[in-house]
Image: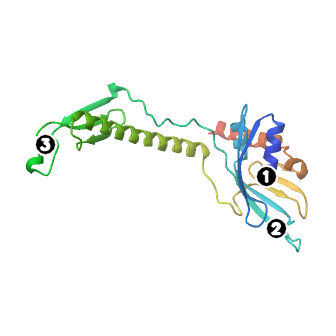
Amino acid sequence: MLLRMYLRWAQQEGLEVELDEVLPGEEAGIKSATFTLKGTNAYGLLSAERGVHRLVRLSPFDSAHRRHTSFASLDVIPLLPEESMDVEIDPKDLRIDVYRSSSAGGQSVNTTDSAVRITHIPTGITAACQNERSQMQNRAVAMRILKARLAERARREREQKIEDIRGDRMGIDFGSQIRSYVLHPYQLVKDHRTGLEIGNVDSVLNGDLDRLIGAELHRRATQDGEE
């Protein structure tokens, strides 16, 4: 029901919608879904809907037709460009040290300064190699290791950026919901953040979310202004 609501809202807003994945539930309904929205203010608007949603209704999946309460969580994250694994490094940012390779001794003792350690000065990340036969080979291997470490660092930073934008996520249970949709024994949509109540539940579930989204964005702006 939530998926249908958001897809209809997006279409009404003139946003481009791509339904990426839908996993069916074990007994009925769907377990999870992923969709992508593209268009003006798509992320900013939908971010107001991030959180846990509570639905109260007479379940059509219950043979006794009893009232059920269920929860679903909406997570909203921005699409960020993928970091390129082919990391470009400015040679000016590198410090390359050459030193004598260590060995087990005997006839295999390496008496030339062929080991290489490369330091990426801006990040302090280092990589070294001393096992190849020549300084050039050791340098090539060390550079590959350094690029891999820098790519991993960029990946972690990207994930942290997404987590910072996403914000805290609450458990999917009582007391954590941002909004309730009650279809029985009365009909009411209530946003617990803004206090806004709407009696026409069918309209909301058909994608009429403008008042709810607008109220939450106004609350955020007012809160930020006070801070």
| 91 relative to 19 in the view: left or right | left
Q: Nearer the viewer, mark 2 or mark 3?
A: 3
Marks 3 & 1, CB-CB < 8 Å contact: no
- Kindly state the secondary structure of the residue where label 3 is placed: loop
- Residue occupying image coordinates x 66% and y 36%: 225
What secondary structure is marked by label 2?
strand
Residue 195 visible in the shown view:
no
Q: Nearer the viewer, residue 137 or 209?
A: 137
Residue 195 in percent (x, y) is at 79, 50
Work out whether mark 1 precedes mark 2 in sequence or the reverse, and give the earlier one: 1
Residue 112 falls in image quadrant: top left
Taking depth in this image into account, of 162 and 83 the one nearest to the observer is 83
Where residue 17 sits, quadrant-wise, is top right
Amino acid at dot 2 = His
Picture colour scheme = rainbow
Q: CA distance from mark 2 to mark 3?
A: 75 Å
Instruction: From the image, state whether disc 3 or disc 1 is nearer to you.
Output: 3
Q: Which residue is mark 2?
A: 68
Residue bearing the label numbered 3: 110
Instruction: Please say whether residue 61 is visible from this viewpoint.
Output: yes
Residue 98, position in %: x, y?
20, 35
- Extreme-bottom residue of the structure: 64
Q: Amino acid at mark 3?
A: Asn
Above or below, 67 against 196 in this view is: below
Packing grade of label 2 (10 A; few <14, some 14-19, many >=20) is: some
Q: Is residue 78 left or right of residue 141?
A: right
Q: Kindly state the secondary structure of the residue where label 1 is placed.
A: helix
**Would you name the residue on which mark 1 appears?**
2
